[in-house]
Every structure is written in C-alpha cells, then in structure tokens.
Image (cartoon, coloured by chain):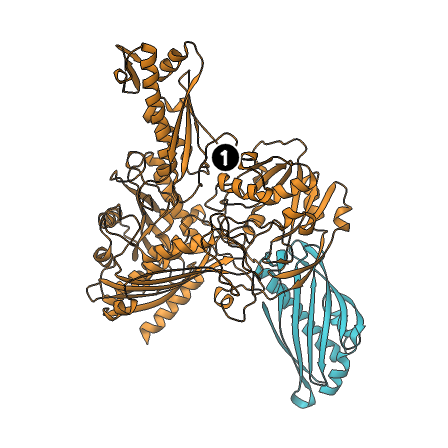
Amino acid sequence: MIELRRVIALAAAPSAVWRRLWDVPRLAACIPGCDGVETLEAERRYRATIRDRVGPFRLAIPLDVQVEATAPIRLVVDASGRDGVLGSPVTVHLTVTLEAGAAGGTRVALVGQADVGGKLAALGQGVIERKTRETLDRFATNLATLFEGGDAAAV
Amino acid sequence: MSLRETIPPLLVIPGVVYAAPVRSPYAHARIVGIGRAAAAAVPGVLAVLAAGDLGVLGERPFGTFLKDQRVLAGDKARYEGEPVAVVVAEDRPTAVRAARLVDVRYEPLPPVVDVERALLPTAPLVHDTPPPLGRQGRWRTVPATNICARVTLEQGSIEQGFREADVVLERTYTFPRVFHFTMEPHGAVASATPTELTVWTNTGHPYQLRQELADMFELDLARIRVVVPYVGGSFGGKSFPKLEPLAAVVSATVGRPVKVVNGVEGSMRTNRRHGARVTVKLGARRDGTLTAKQARVLLDGGAYADLGPVVAEKTGVRQLGPYRVPHYSIEVQNVYTTTTPAGAFRSIGGPQSVWATESIMDELAAALDMDPVELRLVNLVARGETVRAGLRPMDADLGDDLKRLVKAMDDGASPEATGRGVAVGISNPAELPISTAIVRLHYDGSVTILCSMVEVGQGLHTVLAQIVAEELGVPRAAILVVSPDTRFGPYDWSSGASRGVTIVGTAVQRAAQDIKAQLLALAAETAGVPAADAVWRDGRVQVGGRSLSPADVVRGWYGRPAGEVIGRGYVRNLGADPAFWEIGMGGVEIDVDRETGVIRLLSYTGLADVGRAINPQLCEQQDVGAVVMGLGHTLFEEMTYSDSGSLLSASMIEYRVPLTVDLPAALSAVLVENGDGAGPYGAKGMGEGGNLAVAPAIANAVARATGARLRDLPLTPERVWAALRAAGARTRA
C-alpha cells in the first residue's frame, strides 16, 4: 500500500473550486497519462484509461472510477482496474477535501492509498512507489495550474 | 544450459506439448469467469483449460497431510500466483504468450497476509470448509478458523516452573518467509493413458508422489511410474507433489504428454519456508538452571497445508532445545494465509525455533550476568538423558561438542573481532525410517545399486557406493547408483530430514550384506562343501582352499559368464524415534560498522556431530553449505508481500541471496566422530543442522559487540543501524 498525501493551496474560493472539479474533461487532462474519461453515470461512475511506462513495460490500465461526493467539501474517489499486459491489479483510493484557505483561497487536501499487485508489484516496490508519487506530484501541479487559469496539458 | 529446460535433462518425449499456467494476480479472489477466446485463437494453442474443464480430476483434492489443494483453483484463488487456468500449446513460448491473453475475471476478496490478523475472529477464511485428511495426515484443521494445525506439548506444571525461577524473561522473535532458491526450478513431464501414468520429474519424493497420483487417478500403485533424474537442488522445496498433478491431469485431458516447467518466479510462487513469530518465556534460577519454558509459535503456512502440520509438530519439539527443562508448555499453530504455500525446507521448523531458543539463552545469560557458554553447559542434556519423554535419549555428548566448538574458535580467533556469539541447535530428523534397497552384483564384478532416495546434490550416491565398496570389496569405480524409477526401483519414504546415510545407507548396507551371505552359500554349493566351510575374508570368499572374488563366485555358480546375485535390504525402523539427534552448533566472530549497520563476518565455525563421517569432505561441504544458506535468512533474505498480498520480491534482483563476497573471511566445520550413530559404521545423518545456529549466533555476537539486541530477521543494515541508535539512546539516558 502506497500512502498518498498532498496539499495544494489555490487562490480561488472553495465554491469555485468545487464547480471546476466537475469539469470532467479538463480534470482528466490533469491526470498524467489519461487520454480521456467516459462518463457512465454523471457524478457517480466513470471509465478512464491511464497509459504509462514502468520499467520495461508500456502499460495501459483501464480503470473503473467511482465517485462519492459530499458537496461542497469532499470527494471520495475509488479507481480500480488491471493492466492489459501483465493483468496486474491497480487500485487507487483518494479522498479530496476542500477547506477555506488563506486570503479567501482554498486548501485542497489529497489523502489516500494506491496499491499495485501481481507481477507488476514484483518490479520492485521502490520503482512503483516512485512512479506513483511522481504521478501524484504531476497531478497536483496540473491541478494547481488548471485552477490558476493555466492549461494543465502544458505541464 | 538453460535453467528452465534442464528438467528432465536431455529428455525428449515424442509428441510432448507445453502447459503454461495462468496465475492469479490477486492474493484472494473469487473467480467469476474465464475468457478463453483470445488465447485459444493463437496459432499453436491446443487448449485453454480451467478447473471446470478437467472433469473429475479437476475436482479431486491432493495433499499428503491435508487434501486441500487442486491442480487449478476452482471457485477462488488463495494466493497471488496460484494457477487458475492453463494454456496448452505445441511449444513453450506460444503457451506462455497465449497465457497472457486468458481473460480471467475476478471478484477480489480481502487478503489475509499476517498470521496474527489471520487468527482474529473477523479474519476472512482462506478455506471455507475443513479439508479431509491426506494419506499421512494426523492433524485436522480447526473449523471456522484459519488454523491449519495446532500442536501442544506439555510437561510438569508451567506455573510451578515459573514460581521456582529467580529470573523470568519473555521475548518475541520473528523469522521471515524465505525461498529455497534451488539452481533448478520445479519441472515435470507427464504422460497419462487410461491405464497408466508416467511422470518424469525433479521431485524429492517419488514414492509419496506415486501415492498421491494413484489416489487422484484411481490407479494401482504398480501403474504409476515416477522417474527422477539428477535434481538441481531441493532443500525440501521439491518434496511432496508440486507441478506433477497439474502435468498429469492436463495430459489426461488433452491426450498428449505434457511438460510444465517453472522459472525462478514461478517456483517462488510454488513453495517457501514457514515464516514464524515465536513468543518465548524462560525461567531460571540465579545459578542459571532452567526451571520453565513457555512458547507460543505462529507459523505462516500460506494458502495450502503441504507439510505444514508436520512442520508444526517438529517445531514443538525443536522449541525445547537441547536443555533440561523440567516444566514446559509449548503451543504451535500453523496458520493459513493468502500467501505462497509453505512446505518442507532444510530442517523443518528448525532455524525458526533455534533462532528464538538460542537468542533468549543469551538474553538470559546477560540478565544473570553469566557467560553464555557457561549457561549452556549448566543446562545441556547429558548423553542418555531425554529432551522429551518418548523420544530417543540424547545420543551425543553436547557439552564436549560445545567445548570443542569454543576451542576451535579460540584457536582461530580474529584480532579484529569485537563480538562473538555461539548457538546450539538440535533437531529430531529422520522420521519414519522406511527404506528398501536392491544391490545387483553382476558376473563381471560390477555392481548396480537401486534405491529411491533422490540425489539432490547432497552426495548420497557417492556415499552409498562407498558403503557397498566397503562391504563387497568392489572398487568404487565399478559401482553404479541408479536414479529413482518407481517401475524398477525399490520403495523409499522420502528424500529429506537428513535421513540418507543413516536409513537408506543401512538399507543398502543390508542389501550388500545379503549378497555376501548368498555368495558364501553359492560358493559352498559350487565347491560341494557345507555352507559353513565358506568364509568371507578381505573382500573375497575363501572356500575349499581357494580364494574367490565375488565375480568368480557368480560365474562359478552359473557355470558360465552369466547371471547375477541380487541383494535385498529392508529398513523399517532403527530403534527409537528419532533415528538420531542431529546436532548443529555454530560460533561466529563479527565486527559491526556503526555508521552503516553492516555486520562484518570475520569467522564462522560450524560443528556437526556426525557419529562417523563416511565421506569427511562431503560432510564438511554439507555443513558449510548449510551455514551459507543460513546466512541468507539471517542477513538478507525475505519474501515480502504487500498489504494486498502481492509477492514483492519475486525476482532474482529483489530477492537477495548470499554472494561469495558475503562469506565470512574464515569458514570451517568441525566434525565430531564418536561412532555412536544408528547408521552404517556408527554414522548419523547431517546436512540440515548447519543452518540451525547461524542466526542466533550472529545476533548474539551483535548483542555482545554493541549492546543492541535484534529480534527480527533478517538482520539488515537498516535494522542493525536502528537497533544501534536505540541502544545508544538507552545507554545515554
């Protein structure tokens, strides 16, 4: 289990941040390796594919994503799937909490765990953890850029 | 030579096809459906099979002690890496490639990765229903729990024992899950017809396997043929059925001979050693005399029982150690978890037990301010005393052995050493001493030995040839030892438990002696004199004033260069159980790098009390080899699992074994030969005992050098460094 923990400070107010979180295509663009999200049930169930390179493998991981929203402060995201090459299970559990931040801004806390199983896990926990944290870092940076009005895809 | 393809070496079976397992990526998951189409469409693929495609053979459980395993997981997978389907193809690369295309749909279930949590009332059950006993089974599971086997040993009154103590210590020690890492992974070829089944395999247990296959296929023993070539290492990892039932059932299903071979990663997902959590409480008087011992042992048995119940039983006795303990209470539980099944491994339950029992002896010595060797000498059982009522009285002079070990260490003492540690291990091996041997003396004087213990690299064949050479006066070069083939060879119980020289050696010796007796009778008959007039002297038959070689007698009796004399040797027991006590002591000198936590090994001296070393060089190398293997679980090795139960160290990079650079600067073995064993010429078994003492000896040395006591293996630099910091903080405070 890889612990995930990031805090992002945004200038926008919590209510504005909450609205923009539901701009699914733009949010998806913040997720490294994600080339689009299919909405199965609005604000509840989505499907997304993450493409990435880990060690010698070029992976495509189709994920089923379930979202539980408690407006306007908390999102609980559960994503799970198995990569197409090794059949290894990947799960992400992430709680996104919005709090009032300094100067009318928002403090976004990302807290959760990721788990990689099967043969992929045997590539080495160091490799997997580094990859996961890098992905989270890039996601956090992209998210900040998105809310500050930039274009996430450019990051 | 490819590691994957050596088994069976040079074996070409006409029409053989290859089966590649599809392994579960989940530690615990219900199997919801299996999509075969993509894999089946690959050219060269003959079949994509799941449990339901195997008919009744897919439903029949196997297991020598508990029948809890099936060739492919049916309803649910119980560990990451368990075979859930198999792809059969004309060649191996195609089978492996197509196996990746099998689309198994799972419904993940909560994993059970930790033994303590596995025992909680809320823990998910690895096996929902209690499995039936196997052929050799004596211990049942505890229903509605994950307890695979529970063994208790009691003597005296534990409360009284602790009341009589001046000092009582209670400590918990942990031992990692480790892998055998044989040079050659598991492999089997099977050819099934409706009336016969032949399996070529690198098993260590051809006759136990024969029984399992006979039960599965409902065939007479005579119709099951198990052929075993030279085996590239076993250390217990090839004991009892492994890939053979799968190969056999798939062969019966597709109607072709089927080959299944593991790579290293596959073998790591097939079998391992039991991890252990040992909480031991020890009471002693101020003079060091032990009064009571209480131990609670949790063995991590993984997903299937394999040898687990026997490991639990042996662990119980091995917890007692080589000491006089008037009051004891031992409880060992072998616990199912959703991890790789654990089975036999060089001294089952031995290193796990001795790690705890010999660490706490040094902790007790420190608490009593006694010399650790002195404390042991006060408590060691003497020759003829019993470790536990009903078992063979001690057949070695343990005190003398320990003094010899210390003397050898003193003689080679390193000036750089900052810490020194010793440990004393004993084990009760060689259970069920059942073996038979056939020795054939040919009319040219050469000899064929048929026995069915497997040469796994331990040097058994060399020693058996030595025994026959000694008995019959035949040159060793004229003796051939044949590898097991159950169609032709005689019965043997197993290849394990240090039993080869003592038990199989006795069977072979008796067969050679049977030949001698027959030669005397035949020579007398040929010479026309009473049988008593023929005598054996210096490897020759003296009869009617003539001196005849064994070959002369054979040719003389048949009247031409033809025929042979066949000797039989049977062993059903060698007196009390165990047939001998295996004694493995060790002493180490170390230095610790306080900056990095690295333990530098300056010398390691092993001691094996072997009764008689029929081949001293082999004995020394066996002992040293066992020590090096022990360095693995002591310093480096651990099969690590994620919280979700995935094996994280399933590669030769992630799983660190000892390398030549890790060996102590001086590494030697002392062999004690008192001629007091139950085997040929007073020999006892050996080969497992060398790894018993390694971990506690090193941890004891670290504690003496630094004041830091480590209770979790392996002693990685990180752990040592942290323990040094903690010990330093305590000293300063």
Q: Nearer the viewer, residue B249 or B448?
A: B249
Quadrant of the drawing holding the N terminus of chain B: top right
Q: Position of residue B272 (x, y in %)?
A: 50, 52
Residue B5 on image: x %, y %: 59, 38
| Residue for badge 1 | B230
Tell which residue pokes out farthest to the left in this image: B287
Amino acid type of disc 1? Tyr
Q: In the image shown, does B317 or B210 lie closer to the viewer?
A: B210
Q: Residue at x 39, y 15 (%)?
A: B554
Image point 51% across, 50% down: which residue? B134
**Which chain is the one coloured cyan?**
A
Which x, y percent locates residue B4? 59, 41
Query: Does B372 sit above or below residue B689?
Result: below
Tell me the chain of label 1. B
Which quadrant would residue B2 be assigned to in this image? top right
Determine if residue B596 is in view: no
Q: Nearer the viewer, residue B401 or B285?
A: B285
Q: Nearer the viewer, residue A141 or B470?
A: B470
Chain shown orange: that is B
- Residue reaching furthest to the bottom: A103
- Report the side of A148 relative to B487 (left or right): right
Q: Which x, y percent locates residue B564?
A: 43, 18
